[in-house]
Image (cartoon, grey):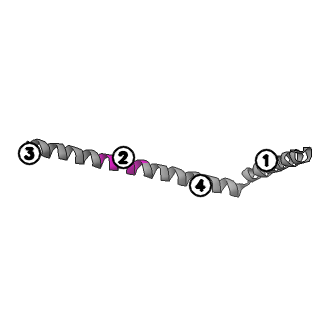
Amino acid sequence: MSLGRVAIFAAGTVVGGVVGYAATKSETVKKATQSTIKAGIKAKDWTVDTFQKATNEVKEMINDAKAEAEVEA
């Protein structure tokens, strides 16, 4: 790799960092980021709740099957 390519890569990294930093200071970006985080938290909560409900239903089915097996025996 030549020194010129390394310099171009380094300059691009610096410019990208500066642009990224400036974007995080923007109120619009902050609001969009907060909205995205809120949506992610809601999705996580829904997923956990749905998983717990499904787990409880499966446990109920197992207990019912065990009870029926004991009655048949």
Instruction: Mark 4 vs mark 3: give the one in front.
Output: 3
Q: CA distance from mark 4 to mark 1?
A: 22 Å
Q: Which residue is mark 1?
A: 17
Q: Amino acid at mark 2?
A: Gln
Mark 2 lies on a secondary structure that is helix
**Sequence-wise, which precedes: disc 4 or disc 3?**
4
Q: Amino acid at mark 3?
A: Glu
Q: CA distance from mark 4 to mark 2?
A: 24 Å
Q: Which residue is mark 3?
A: 72
For residue 59, what is the image quadrant?
top left
Q: In this view of the protein, which residue sits in the foreground, 50 or 33?
A: 50
Mark 4 lies on a secondary structure that is helix
Mark 3 lies on a secondary structure that is helix
Q: Which residue is mark 2?
A: 52
**Sequence-wise, which precedes: disc 2 or disc 1?**
1
Query: Do the residues bearing badges 3 and 2 touch, measured as CB atoms within 8 Å?
Result: no
Instruction: Mark 3 vs mark 1: give the one in front.
Output: 3
Q: Which residues are magenta?
A: 48-56
Q: CA distance from mark 2 to mark 1?
A: 42 Å
Relative placement, left or right, of 12 versus 39 is right
**Sequence-wise, which precedes: disc 3 or disc 1?**
1
Query: Do the residues bearing badges 4 and 1 touch, measured as CB atoms within 8 Å?
Result: no
- Quadrant of the drawing holding the C terminus: top left
Check disc 1: other Cα within 10 Å, few if <14, some if 14-19, many if 20+: few
Q: CA distance from mark 3 to mark 1?
A: 70 Å
Q: Which residue is mark 4?
A: 36
